[in-house]
Amino acid sequence: MDAENLLQKSLILHEQVLGSSHPETLRSMDNLAWAWSKQRKLVEAEFLARETLMGREQALGFNHPDTLLSMNNLSVILIEEKGSVEEAEIFCKASLVVQLRLQSPDHPDVLESQSIFVGILYGQGNHEDAEQQFRLVL
């Protein structure tokens, strides 16, 4: 059985046993969405990533680290799927702002969000701002 099938089976079991809004079910959804994105099943990945983000916002709240992770994952998927840099920037910035409010600037989650944001800025051709943000990550 390949990883995708295991992740799908895990999601089904989590939904059956714990319900669709349980944090572990939402983690399974996020894992499957990420796996799909790496397999270039980007339409499916985006759909599931959006579902995961909505579920985490409702179950855990906007400021929860898992919700912020979902925002970052959706940002990356949006860029990979349709080059939707503007929408990706909205999610990434929102995540980064909250993370900077709740965590130190050198926290791994903050650094990951900043790294994604640098990629977004660079993708928009905003090389000067990308370089400035990159220096913050270093």
Image: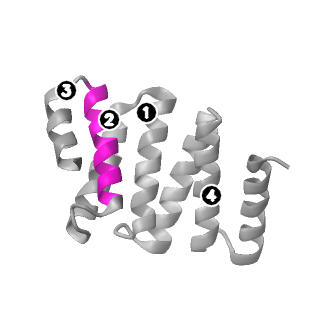
Locate residue 33, reporting x and y percent.
60, 48
- Of 111 and 59, the residue lying toward us: 111
Q: Residue placed farthest to the bottom in the image? A: 18
The circle drawn on residue 123 is none
Q: Nearer the viewer, mark 4 or mark 2?
A: 2
Q: Which residue is mark 4?
A: 29
Q: Nearer the viewer, mark 1 or mark 2?
A: 2
Residue depicted at x 54% and y 50%: 49
Q: Categorize mark 3 by other alpha carbons within 10 Å: few (<14), some (14-19), many (20+).
A: some
First in residue order: circle 1 vs circle 2: 1
Locate residue 27, reporting x and y percent.
59, 64
Q: Which residue is mark 1?
A: 79
Q: CA distance from mark 3 to mark 2?
A: 10 Å
In the image, what residue type sits under mark 2? Gly
Residue depicted at x 57% and y 72%: 23
In the image, what residue type sits under mark 3? His
Q: CA distance from mark 1 to mark 2?
A: 10 Å
The circle drawn on residue 119 is 2
Please state if 100 lies on the left or on the right of 10 as rendered: left
Q: Which residue is mark 3?
A: 127
Q: Nearer the viewer, mark 1 or mark 3?
A: 3
The answer to whether the residue labelled 1 contacts the one labelled 2, judged by CB atoms less than 8 Å apart, is yes
Please state if 67 lies on the left or on the right of 106 as rendered: right
Looking at the rendered structure, the secondary structure element under dot 1 is helix
Residue segment shown in magenta:
109-124
Q: CA distance from mark 4 to mark 3?
A: 34 Å
Residue depicted at x 62% and y 32%: 40
Reply yes or no: does residue 49 show up in magenta. Answer: no
Q: CA distance from mark 1 to mark 4?
A: 19 Å
